[in-house]
Image: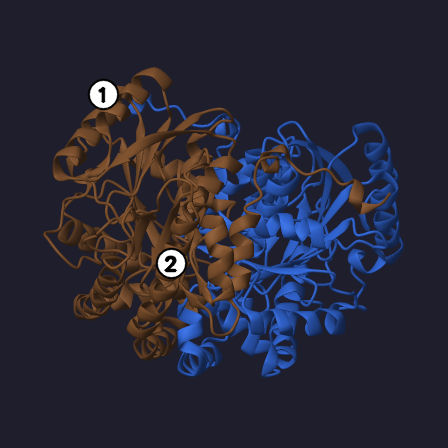
Chain colours: A brown, B blue
Amino acid sequence: MKIDSLRYASRFDHVSGSAIREIFKVIAQPGMISFAGGNPSLAALPDAEAAEIARDVLTEKGKVILQYGATEGYAPLLETLRRWIPENLGFDVPAVLPVTGSTQAMDLLCKALINPGDRIIVENPSFLGNLQCMRLYEAELVPVELEEDGLDVNHLERLFRECRPKMLYTIPTFQNPTGRTLSLEKRKKVAELAAEYGVIVAEDDPYRDLRYRGEKLPAIKSFDQEGWVVYLGSFSKIISPGMRVGYMVGDPALIRKCTIGKQSSDLHTANLTQAIVDQFIRRGILPDHIRRISADYAAQCDTMLSCLSSFPEGVSYTQPDGGLFLWVDLPEGIDAKELLQAAIERKVAFVPGTHFYALGGHENTLRLNFSASTLPQIQQGMEVLRDLVAEAIRKL
Amino acid sequence: MKIDSLRYASRFDHVSGSAIREIFKVIAQPGMISFAGGNPSLAALPDAEAAEIARDVLTEKGKVILQYGATEGYAPLLETLRRWIPENLGFDVPAVLPVTGSTQAMDLLCKALINPGDRIIVENPSFLGNLQCMRLYEAELVPVELEEDGLDVNHLERLFRECRPKMLYTIPTFQNPTGRTLSLEKRKKVAELAAEYGVIVAEDDPYRDLRYRGEKLPAIKSFDQEGWVVYLGSFSKIISPGMRVGYMVGDPALIRKCTIGKQSSDLHTANLTQAIVDQFIRRGILPDHIRRISADYAAQCDTMLSCLSSFPEGVSYTQPDGGLFLWVDLPEGIDAKELLQAAIERKVAFVPGTHFYALGGHENTLRLNFSASTLPQIQQGMEVLRDLVAEAIRKL
């Protein structure tokens, strides 16, 4: 029998993701200025420190690090997280599980909670990668509208009441893709509504330490009385995404279920990468490192915003207080996918906003990343985009 | 609302795994001689080489290693695998995907292929961890009987014909838990039957390099004409399980589906651990390392077999040509779970065989691991077990 006759599982019926994958192939071309990815800048990746730490931990604890580890996590990192999270994030740690990047946290949450057809509320727009994860668990995605100060809590309450969702997925701080931040009042309200309606809140918060303006806000998790909020943390944006180390904090029974799920996902996260992250924290390297990369990113963000201020009338954009992204609304009738084709010819790339909407549409929007480009690249690339947008407006 | 009211996904309805977890808690006690796990010996873990390699790769390619990587794998490791697999395993590489331990390969295969209720043929007994993985995908597990020379191919053909399974899961070389090896003729037959009936064969082969006697056998994959066999390889037993690096080789369309599944499982395997494995191969360290650890393991295996030869009449056991495990059949009526309780009191642990049977039963069997104990520990522990078995036989 020919292998072409193989039938795949039905969870893949509505998952392709090819549009984005095509974009990422294109931006790998030499000379491309890419505002498309979400990569840290190369200058932000602490390779010298990592080299020293890797050698040290393998010299001192090599046998433990190379041996099988516990699914529950590498013991020294667990100890560190139980101290570091309350100190830095301001909430208690009922239970914590180190994971292979916070991507895995989302996968394990869906594995623990989602039956096909269960509803998940997602911000409109939201992070593409995790939307795909939810689709593979055959969840029904229900969008909640975003406002200037984060998700619309009135809309959210109506959806909680009418849709009986299993979970809300939110990125409250410097949201991907919009750069928006959920206000303090709304954070309290989300925690309240979760407990009132019995909905798990997956609080995905990888950007919170990259703040360029304003005061830090407490996590939604810090207002969680009953345990309905699961906090997803990541070291990808403040140490290294290639290391694949994140963590999830939540109710012990739910974390236990995720741990059982993780046993057959990858048994455990590599001990070596857990040990390296542990040492970055224990050695006290992180605060200065975060200050340094935030100063760089702030300059990149400001440069991009300053370029946007000279865009034609009818173009609006978010002015994020941190993170890696900002969001552009073009006049109705302009298709960002067509704009992308023209931009790629002139060696500039971004992601059309429509891909971030669970139900599509919004063709006149786009996401720009500023962390992976130098200031001259930002200026050069934004000039190209400004010209193309101006041309598209003239043609309307 | 109280979090106790949270309802988990139904895929967890029949998954507990608690029996084994309890055993592993117990064996963590100091002074315990453990034949229970599947850990490499500490002497087999190349910590000095890993420390040097980790520092080197992070010094030379730190920025690439710390940045986001491709889901498809770390480019230098891919290049190495495409050369190393044909040279060492004797089959072509239509497509290969590095994974976060071969545990993840099984998870991705199920994700790509298994709808609830789909049937998977599993050896009776088989590897516990992957049985749990299949249960979480709500597969129906159908056992195929094992003979001295591996699975019963006549039984297999009947099951292929009558059950229309989606997949066969087999560990053909030094099987976990029995230590048995599928014969050359049967390997050809399994590949033929897979193509004839259109059944994916997951060939899980982590022990093949740990051979202490006899000639290496070609993989089932090397007889695969049509692409139905997926080969799951692992570096856990020949470099380090704590590193979590394995790979899967198979049909390009199926590997592509697994790659899309991996995007939302953990995005990619840590670049650092992939780079370290790559260097172990490129630097030519592996052949000597495998020879050295195989010599040690062979002595441990022989010592355990020699101890078993003095066990009372009515006890039979496998005599594996390699791997980490052997398998003991006690006289009918003896319950290995009760034996374990008595053994633990005398500081010896093993895993009762019943846990490895998809449908349970076979209470008079047990699995012994010899790789994680020294020769004196093996002698001491086996003396305890011999006494306890003799006592249990007297009581029959």
- Residue position for label 1: A196
In front of the other: A170 or B304: A170
Q: Considering the image in quadrants, where does the N terminus of chain A appear? A: top right
Residue displayed at 73% across by 57% down: B173
Could you say where residue A366 lies in the image, as x and y percent from the top left? 38, 49
User: In the figure, is residue A182 to the left or right of B289?
Assistant: left
Q: Is residue B265 above or below residue B364?
A: below
Q: Position of residue B14 (x, y in %)?
A: 53, 28
Of all chains, the one bearing label 2 is A
Of the numbered discs in the image, which one, if any, rests on residue A38?
Answer: 2
Report, in whole angstroms, how far the alpha carbon at label 1 lies from the one at label 2. 35 Å
Return the residue found at the far front. A394
Asked if one can make out residue B105 in the rendered structure from this viewpoint, the answer is yes
Q: Position of residue A118 (x, y in %)?
A: 45, 25
Determine whether, in the image, residue A126 is placed left or right of residue B263: left
Viewer-proximal residue, A381 or A54? A381
Please tell me how crowded label 2 is: few (under 14), some (14-19), or many (20+) other residues with Cα within 10 Å: some
At horizontal 47% and vertical 30% (from top left) the residue drawn is A139
- Which residue is rendered at x = 54% and y = 49% of the image? A19
Label 1: chain letter: A
Dividing the picture into quadrants, the one containing residue B200 is top right
The C terminus of chain A appears in which quarter of the rendering?
top left
Using the image as rendered, state which of residue B142 and residue A227 is in the foreground. A227
**Amino acid found under the numbered disc labelled 2:** Gly
Give the vertical position of A184 relative to A164 (above or below).
below
Q: Residues within 10 Å of mark 1 (few under 14, many from 20)?
A: some
Residue B43: x and y, percent? 50, 73
Sequence-first disc among 1 and 2: 2
Q: Amino acid at mark 1?
A: Glu
| Residue visible at 40% across and 76% down in the picture | B62
Q: Is residue A220 left or right of residue B101?
A: left
